[in-house]
Each structure stands twice: as C-alpha cells, then as structure tokens.
Image (tube, helix red, strand yellow):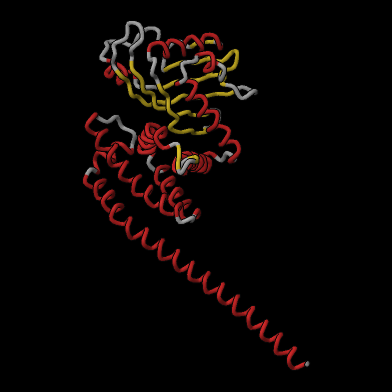
Amino acid sequence: MKVRFGIKNIAETVGVIAIVLSLVFVGLQLQQTHEIAVSEVFSANTGHRIEANIAIVDNSAVWAKASSGDVLTTEELLVIDRLIENLWEARLSLFHHFYELGDEAGADVILTDFAEYLSRNQGIFDIWTKQQLRLSDARTTFSGQESPLRRGVEDITSRVRALAAQDTKSETGLSSTDMAELIDFATRYAAAWSGQDPVAFASFYAENGSFRINDGEASMGREAVEQKARSFMTSFPDMEVQLIGIKQEDSFVEFYWRWTGTNTGSGGTGNSVDLRGHEEWTFDGDGLILESLGHMDDAEYQRQMNATDIPDDL
C-alpha cells in the first residue's frame, strides 16, 4: 500500500514537472518568436532608414539651413518637408511594428531616440511639429480607439521640451521644478501672443509692467501692453509666436522666439514676416512680468515687409 502510494505521488510530481517544463518551453518559443519578429522588423526597416539618411546627405546644405532655423525659400521648404517626412516615416514604421507586437518598451525606445534627435535640431523640430499638426486630424483613430501615433507625437513633443529644460538647467543651475514652471510660463506666453486675445496676453504682465521693443517707446502699465499687443494682432491676424528657448541670467530671463505672420490688417502690405528675436524678462514678486525688453532685427523686418519704415503702431 505504501509502495503504491509512493508511486502515485511520484507520478503526480513527474506530471507537474512535465507541465512546468512544457510551459517553460512554450515561453522560450514565444520569446524566440518575438526576438525573430523584432529582428525581421529591424531588417525590413534598414533600407528605409538608409534611404532617408542618404537623402539628407544629398541635401546637406538645405538640411543645415533648416536645422539652424534660417528662413527657407519655397523650394527649400518643399525639399525639407520631404526629407523630414522620410526620416519620420522610417521611425514611424518601427513604432507601428513594435506596437502591433505588443512591445511597448521597443516602441518607447523609438520615441525617445527621435525626441533626442529633434532636441538637438530645433529648426527641424519646428517644421516636424507643423507637419504633424497638419496630419493630426487625419490620424485621430486607430482600430476604433485613440491613435497610438497621435499619442506618440504628443509624447515626442513633451519629451523634446523636457530635454530642452534639462539642457537649460545645466547652464543656469535652476532646479528642474523651477525650469519646468518657467518653460510652462513661456509656452503659455507664446500661445497668448498667437491667440488674437490682447487681454489674455496682457495678463502675463504686472499692473505696472512695461513692454518695449528695441529702442522704441515703452508701453507702461498693463493697459498699454494690451494696446501694443492689439496693434500687432490687428496688423497680423494670422501671427504666430513660437517658443524657441529659455535662458536664465543673473537678474532676468531671456525668452527666445520665432514670429511669423502676414500683414493683412487695415493698410497692410500683404507681405509675410518670419523673424527671430528675444525678450528679456524681469519678474515681480507675484511671478508676473515687470519689464520686458524686446530685441528684433529692424532692418530684416523692413526688408521682409518691403517698406521704408516700420509702421508707427508697431
């Protein structure tokens, strides 16, 4: 009886071991299958990535110009749009494959890699962002749900800003929290410039705050700042201000911007502007702008506007 009982237990133990081993085998098979699938994805994508990089090398002068944020001609913009589209599509293909394989870590690596690349090429990041804004409405859904691509684009954008914050922190000594708040302030400030709402823009200034461009007359007080913003927004109804960078100095903050727009307001020339400059901010105790000193290239402004002088209201 004891012998038979012992044999029964041994048989059950052997059966359990066999099941465990079979599960381990299945797991190894699945892992191997996944590794093979990942390898095939990379192999299939290699040609696409090589072609994208060769195209950039063939157009290196235009690529360098775009990376530095210089103004591009219409022909150059067409070239850059295609180069960036090829570069993104190569990574997008990998992103989709990893996502479909259920490999979120692999998909995350693709986003991180591209975000780091864009953070080192601000001009390319600006153009890529505009491309994705144009395409975002067409890519809202994915299998009946929110598109992972749309989430990926938003994720890349936030990562690029985070990387920019880290770079600025290393130069300024600000804590990550302080710099994050400063970047958030600057982002909202740029959006207010672009929002055709002078009241919202003026709310970033203290009641006794001032705003001045180059050696022009300063707009003193929040109401005057509001009027100055309104003159810009009226003259350039489609104006857009983009945050390019933030730099902390000893007693002030430098807000670097890119301004684009078309002078189609009353009495306008109909010409477009695409300029870069910066403002020097001094804050009050409530975190509002006490003084903003704006710096821009007046000569370049006049050249783009094809006018002999800058309008008085600007």
* Residue plotted at (39% across, 19% down): 239
Instruction: Using the image as rendered, state which of residue 121 and residue 302 is in the foreground.
Output: 121
Q: Percent from the top left, x then y, of residue 234?
A: 41, 11
Quadrant of image for the C terminus: top left
Q: Is residue 164 visible?
A: no
Q: Percent from the top left, x then y, of residue 102?
A: 49, 55
* Residue plotted at (51% across, 41% down): 162
Relative vertical location of residue 121 with respect to residue 314 in this rendering, above or below: below
The number of callouts visible is 0
Relative vertical location of residue 214 with respect to residue 107 in this rendering, above or below: above
Q: Is residue 296 left or right of residue 288?
A: left
* Residue plotted at (46% across, 11% down): 230
Quadrant of image for the N terminus: bottom right
Relative vertical location of residue 172 with respect to residue 238 in this rendering, above or below: below
Q: Is residue 211 visible?
A: yes
Relative vertical location of residue 204 with respect to residue 67 in this rendering, above or below: above
Q: Percent from the top left, x then y, of residue 233?
A: 42, 14
Instruction: Using the image as rendered, state which of residue 260 and residue 136 is in the foreground.
Output: 136
Instruction: Using the image as rendered, state which of residue 101 and residue 268 is in the foreground.
Output: 101
Q: Percent from the top left, x then y, of residue 29?
A: 48, 70
* Residue plotted at (30% across, 36% down): 66
Q: Can you tell which quarter of the image residue 83 is in?
A: top left
